[in-house]
Image (spheres, rainbow, N blue to C red):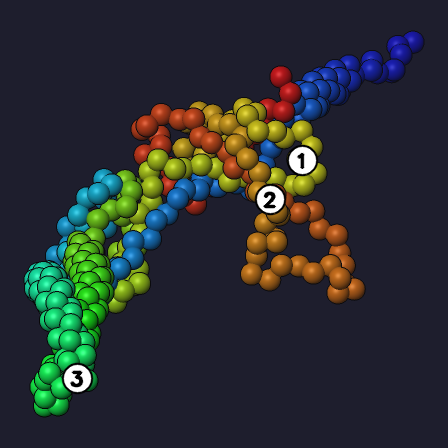
């Protein structure tokens, strides 16, 4: 009698075994990978963006660039009408020339007053001699009038001459003092005039500086963007005209969870995958860490003391240097999404 017993199907166990084996291999590989790496896709390309601001007001005379084009540091990009500032500079130069002329006049006054001082000193000596002679005559007449050798009138004339000589001597001394004081006043006036010259020089320097601000140059090399200026437009001091994305300052900002930071250190190797260029191999290096979580820098930072506390894992921005060729660096743009993987253990 034939048996109807079916042979067990060995295909299903084999398939299950293969699936388990593949799963085990995959799990082991993932375990090994994540034990040595920290990954995040909350990352993007960042860079220094320099806003170019008008430092003086005026009408735009010329524009020497096109938006989204590369410019070099120091390149002239915008020229403002400089007629008003040229006139201000000429006025400052004229005032400076006047101040220098005032110095010459004051110096001449000092020289003349110094010469008068010498004359006044000589007059004192002459008045002193006259006073001595008049005093001697007076003393002689005073003795002679007692015995009647001279008349009372002659004695009074000698006394008057003595008093006049005394007054002349005192006047000469006062004149000398006044002349000396005039020299001091002139020297003080010279110091004031010299200060005025320094002030006029400062005004000239300021006028030159403001005139130079009418020529707006690129502060750094990079790509010009967000152009907000046209020929003939009136711009005000402090107005942003455009921005320049520095082409030598690109880096990655990766926002790692706080639970991923334990093994992260500066200098660790980083593998970077740019979403826009998935076939490009980009490497990097951990540079530094933000001093606070991203939430603390937000407009309305969370306050856990309100009583409605819910624990949320925070993220800390980590700056990563990019090591890539010049061609790829020229393709990268701030804001591009990337995925980074930090090698925490060799």
Compare residues 1 and 287 and report the one nearer the observer.
Answer: 287
- Image point 8% across, 62% down: which residue? 115
State which quarter of the image contains the C terminus.
Answer: top right
Compare residues 272 and 14 and report the one nearer the observer.
Answer: 272
Relative to 216, residue 30 above or below: above
Relative to 31, residue 210 above or below: below
Q: Earlier in the sequence, mark 2 or mark 3?
A: 3
Relative to 220, residue 23 above or below: above
- Image point 67% across, 29% down: which residue? 263
Mark 3 closeness class: few <14, some 14–19, many ≥20 residues within 10 Å: few
Q: For mark 1, give the secondary structure.
A: helix
Alpha carbon separation for disc pair 1 and 2: 16 Å
- Percent coordinates x, y for residue 127 in the rendering: 12, 71
Mark 2 closeness class: few <14, some 14–19, many ≥20 residues within 10 Å: few
Q: Is residue 134 left or right of residue 252?
A: left
- Numbered label attached to residue 147: 3
- Numbered label attached to residue 291: 2
- Image point 75% across, 65% down: which residue? 306
**Labelled pair 2, 3 in contact (Cβ < 8 Å):** no
- Numbered label attached to residue 283: none
- Image point 77% across, 14% down: which residue? 10
**Labelled pair 1, 2 in contact (Cβ < 8 Å):** no
- Percent coordinates x, y for residue 302 in the rendering: 66, 59
The residue carrying mark 1 is 260
């Amino acid at each position: 009698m034939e048996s109807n017993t079916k042979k067990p199907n060995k295909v299903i166990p084999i398939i299950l075994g293969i699936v388990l084996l593949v799963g085990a291999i995959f799990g082991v590989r993932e375990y090994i990978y994540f034990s040595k790496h920290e990954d995040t896709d909350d990352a993007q390309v960042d860079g220094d963006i320099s806003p170019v601001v008008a430092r003086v007001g005026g009408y735009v005379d010329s524009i020497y660039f096109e938006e989204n084009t590369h410019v070099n540091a120091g390149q002239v990009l915008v020229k403002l009408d400089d007629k008003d500032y040229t006139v201000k500079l000429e006025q400052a130069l004229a005032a400076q020339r006047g101040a220098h002329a005032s110095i010459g006049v004051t110096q001449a006054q000092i020289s003349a007053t110094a010469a008068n001082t010498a004359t006044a000193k000589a007059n004192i000596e002459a008045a002193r001699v006259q006073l001595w002679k008049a005093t001697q005559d007076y003393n002689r007449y005073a003795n002679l009038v007692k015995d009647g050798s001279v008349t009372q009138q002659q004695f009074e004339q000698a006394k008057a001459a003595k008093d006049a000589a005394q007054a002349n001597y005192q006047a000469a001394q006062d004149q000398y003092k006044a002349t000396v004081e005039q020299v001091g006043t002139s020297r003080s006036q010279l110091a004031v005039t010299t200060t005025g010259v320094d002030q006029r020089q400062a005004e000239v320097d300021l006028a030159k500086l403001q005139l130079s601000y009418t020529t707006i140059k690129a502060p750094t090399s990079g790509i010009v963007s967000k152009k907000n200026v046209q020929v003939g437009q009136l711009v005000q001091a402090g107005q942003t005209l455009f921005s320049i994305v520095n082409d030598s300052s690109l880096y990655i900002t990766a926002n790692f969870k706080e639970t991923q930071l334990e093994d992260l250190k500066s200098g660790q190797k980083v593998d970077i995958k740019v979403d826009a260029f998935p076939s490009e191999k980009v490497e990097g290096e951990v540079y530094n860490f933000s001093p606070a979580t991203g939430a603390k820098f937000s407009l309305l930072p969370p306050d856990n003391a309100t009583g409605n506390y819910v624990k949320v894992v925070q993220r800390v921005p980590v700056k990563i240097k990019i090591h890539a060729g010049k061609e790829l660096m020229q393709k990268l743009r701030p804001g591009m999404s990337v995925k980074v993987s930090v090698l925490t253990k060799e």
